[in-house]
Image: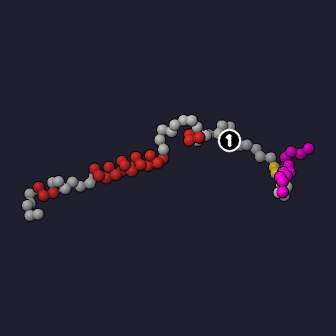
Amino acid sequence: MNTETIKVVYQDMKPIMVHRVSIGAFCDKTVDVPVGMTDKIPETSRFLDALEKKYKEDHRLIANALSFGDYGKAGGSHV
């Protein structure tokens, strides 16, 4: 019996001929399960990381903004 090519028949579908598939050397035997599907509590989330990045960027921009507190004190009083 030749097992290199077999015929697959399923309910009302037309039968198809399939060939043997070999698993490559780079295939991992253990499947990585996403953290959200396990009992572990995630340490962070992409949403919170994005909010934190925006918060830091906004505060950096505020810190670099010009200060107008000394604007009229540089000598001239013709404001």
Whether residue 17 is visible, yes or no, is no
- Single out the residue that lies furthest toward the top: 40
x and y, in percent, of residue 31 in the image: 65, 39
x and y, in percent, of residue 63 in the image: 28, 50
Residue depicted at x 76% and y 44%: 22
Whether residue 2 is visible, yes or no, is yes
Q: Main secondary structure of the magenta part?
A: loop
x and y, in percent, of residue 56 in the image: 36, 47
Residue bearing mark 1: 27
Relative depth, front residue between 53 and 20? 53
Report the side of 19 relative to 43 (left or right): right
Callout 1 amino acid: Cys
The region drawn magenta spans 1-12
Residue depicted at x 68% and y 41%: 27
Q: Quadrant of the C terminus?
A: bottom left
Tell whether position 49 is magenta. Answer: no
x and y, in percent, of residue 4 in the image: 84, 46
Q: Residues within 10 Å of mark 1 (few under 14, many from 20)?
A: few
Report the side of 59 relative to 1 (left or right): left
Tell whether position 11 is magenta. Answer: yes
Does residue 49 sit above or below 77 in this rendering?
above
Does residue 7 sit above or below 30 in this rendering?
below
Q: Quadrant of the N terminus?
A: top right
Report the side of 76 relative to 43 (left or right): left
- Single out the residue that lies furthest toward the bottom: 78
Relative depth, front residue between 75 and 51? 51
Residue depicted at x 67% and y 41%: 26
